[in-house]
Amino acid sequence: MGAAASLATGCATAQPAYPAKPAQSATASKPPPPPAKDSDGDGRPDGWREKSMEIGTQPARDVGLSKKKIPPVLEEALADPYSLKGLKTCAKLVAEIQRLNDVLGPDYQTGNEYTENRTGKLAEAGGKAIVNSIIPFRSLVREISGAAPADRHLEALGDAGLARRGFLRGVHQKQGCKQRF
């Protein structure tokens, strides 16, 4: 477990970055993708600690000793993703979209190029492989402990949140709202 934690803490975030597409001239070659953000100055992309902790605590979630907290906004989205109850004004629509953005992360933006940190992805995959090999018959243990159904529920919540955000953005646009989110 110590080796897994050591490997996991050294991994870089595998979260994709969506930088704006630069204008390209006919003679210009495509520049290399920008490095991942490093706002804390430690030489590692932002979010690596969170990703390392998630990988390291996976065995505890597999056996049911630890559970992820479910944001209420996602439970509400799963219950009724297309509800407009209490969302009559543009300001309220924007506030609800922002609540979803806070949980789901930023929404997709057109005109952006997808890039990812290949080294970070490899480190993450290695860390997960080591940590996931700790529990024999992992998939069976996850089903018995309730971790697998909980993950499926969490995935359904994320899908409902994405559907609700898209729906609310459409309503926002249809009503001619000018506020940004």
Image (cartoon, rainbow, N blue to C red):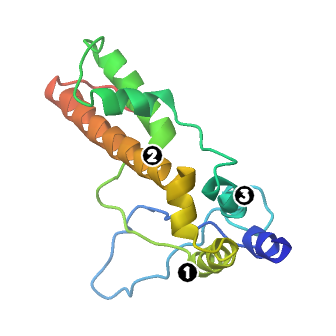
Q: In which quarter of the image is residue 49?
A: bottom right
Distance Cα–Cα, label 3 vs label 2:
18 Å
Q: In this view, does 21 lie above or below 77?
A: below
User: Left or right: 94 with respect to 2?
Assistant: left
Q: How crowded is mark 2: few (under 14 residues within 10 Å), some or many (20 or more)?
A: some
Query: In the image, what residue type sits under mark 2?
Result: Leu
Which mark identifies residue 154? 2
Q: Residue at x 50, y 37 (%)?
A: 102
Mark 1 or mark 2, which has the lower sequence index? 1
Q: Residues within 10 Å of mark 1 (few under 14, many from 20)?
A: few
Q: Quadrant of residue 63?
A: bottom right
Q: In which quarter of the image is residue 43?
A: bottom right
**Could you tell me which quadrant the C terminus lies in?**
top left
Which mark identifies residue 159? none
Q: What element carries label 2?
A: helix
Query: In the image, what residue type sits under mark 1?
Result: Arg
Q: Is mark 1 on a helix, strand or loop?
A: helix
Question: Which residue position is annotated with label 3?
Answer: 53
- Between disc 3 and disc 2, the foreground one is 2
Question: Which residue position is annotated with label 1?
Answer: 118
